[in-house]
Image: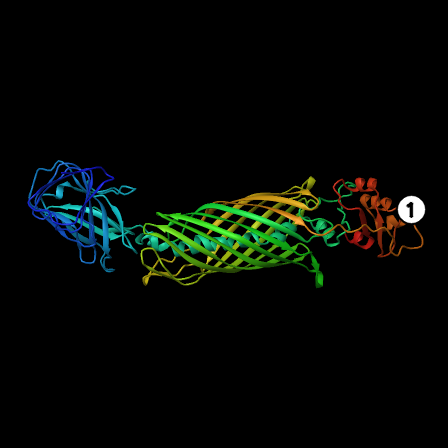
Amino acid sequence: YIIGDDQSKFVLNNKIKNAKVHLFDTNLVLCNDSNLDGNVLGLHSGTLSMVNNQAGVAALDTLTVTGDTNFVADVDLANSTMDRLTAATYGTHSGNLNVVGMNLLSDAPENREITEIYFAETGLKDNVTNSLPSGQWNLPENSHQTTFYTPIYKYNAVYDNREDGGYFLFTKGDKIIQPGGGTTSTGNASDAFNPAVMASPVAAQAGASATMNQTFNYAFQNADNFMNIPYLERVSMKMKNRYALSPTGDATDVGTFSPLFTKQDSSSVWVKPYASFENIPLKNGPKVSNTTYGTLVGFDSALTPMKRGWERVWTGYIGYNGASQRYSGVDSTQNGGLLGGTLTLYKGNFFNATTISAGATVAENTNMYGHENFTMLLAGIGNKTGYNFEFKEGKLILQPNMLLSYTFVNTFDYTNAAGVKIKSDPLNAIQLAPGLKVIGNLKGGWQPYASVNMVWNLLDKSDVTANSVKLPEMSIKPYVQYGVGVQKRFKDNCMAFGQAMIQNGGRNGVSLTAGFRWSLGKETKPIEKVQAPQSTQKTAQSTSIEKLKLTTQADLVQRANGGVYSSGEKKIVKQLTPTQKTALTKNSPNTTRTTMIGQLKRI
């Protein structure tokens, strides 16, 4: 009598002769399939394992199954054999032999759709079952589909109770055996493979490629901030200590000060943490639960004039990036870093930004065989173009834009925990993402916005082999991305913002990001002089005001400058008093007001 519980184990290294063996509750392991040959075996409960990496037969004198007992067997698909029990005589069974596990020693030939293996004689066949999978298939009683694995492939197994005995039928995991015979396809090529060999293409698509795309989304910091601002505000920034006046005629409406830039210095540093939580149903691949996270830190140069009305800003950034995926019993994490640079060009309401980045990441996988590690090299280039259409003097901005990017991911070859050689060709992916952004400029420096993008991934199919067996070419399906954000200045040299974007389609989830921006440099000293004025000064009632058709606000400028005007293209600069500053705007961080008569006429 071999008695114990499910935590105990009885290992039989040698043969037993002329004995009656009864198994209760515990685990009995046969190191050789013939160790019980010629004996009486009573199975009452527990588990009988014949797994010893060879398929054989236990030829008993008598076999009786009096209670439900589990059975684990070696299976040789190439030779259509498996461990099994036979007996000269069978007792009266009152329980079932439930085949709960199979150790697959080999793969079935590629040209064989169904592999049939004889398992039970007529005296036992009616008392054999196989365990249920997570979802029950529409098959007859005692014929449930169960999943088993080799290091490369996944197989479905079904017990088929026939008149001449009991058989197990095996097909690749993307094929489902039908009760009437034949198979149907699941429609997903990756179902035929062990999830453990899919780590490289999944990590390249859902991890590395998604990380680079997040970088492209967030690397255009300067353009995203600067182009949220109305045109007149941007003119004032280019003129530094000058104001561009809003032409509304309201003496207190001089435009909303940007919460992203200061009038003193547009050079700045910024930090941008991000995270996304989503599931990705990869085309020809598994459905992946994916999380990406990281932080970008960057520096923007001052806005520099160029020829023909263009301005430029140089940006440098570094970043930490991480990602994790979970699918079909596999956990994968990646951690790495990158660095990059961006050139942003502006002209009027048009902008174009190009960024280049490169980095590396180390991946660690955990699967049914243990742990494994591999390294990926990342690089890419992205370009974002857009144009602002302003309404209501810049209080509402519509910005159509286009993001085009190329991503290169090279996964270095490695051997996984099951001893399979994984070889990956570089992944080359092109992403096309047209979008529309709606921006509001409110009082107090608040800038809420909403955006929507449609994302297509082109030429992004993976090319990976496992022991020279080609794995399915996976890719991310198109998806739509939409969400909202808000920006706000807290001090003259600091701002913060937050954004949430939702993805649906090829990616399903939410992406979150927030950020801070600090301007650099010291405030410029105020200027208090009149540059090349005319000899004749005129008062606020002068006919030259009518000639120049200055607005009410321009008249306020004249009064603030002590009634000094110039009839030519001369610049008038005057130190403002605190009372004058308050009259102009409560939010002004500046102490100097500069106007250009010619520019006022143009505005």
For label 1, the residue is 539
Query: What is the x, y in percent for residue 174?
Result: 29, 52
Tell me: residue 185, above or below residue 44. Answer: below
Q: Nearer the viewer, residue 157 or 44?
A: 44
Q: Secondary structure at mark 1?
A: loop
With 354 as the anchor, is 307 left or right in this view? right
Local crowd size for mark 1, using a 10 Å CA cut-off: few (<14), some (14–19), many (≥20)? some
| Image point (88%, 54%), residue name | 567
Q: Nearer the viewer, residue 13 or 173?
A: 13
With 22 as the anchor, is 400 left or right in this view? right
Q: Quarter-wise, where is residue 125 in the image? A: top left
| Image point (61%, 44%), residue name | 497
Can residue 284 be seen from the camera position used here?
Answer: no
Query: What is the x, y in percent for residue 297?
Result: 59, 52
Q: Quadrant of the N terminus?
A: top left
Q: Amino acid at mark 1?
A: Thr
Can residue 144 be seen from the camera position used here?
Answer: yes
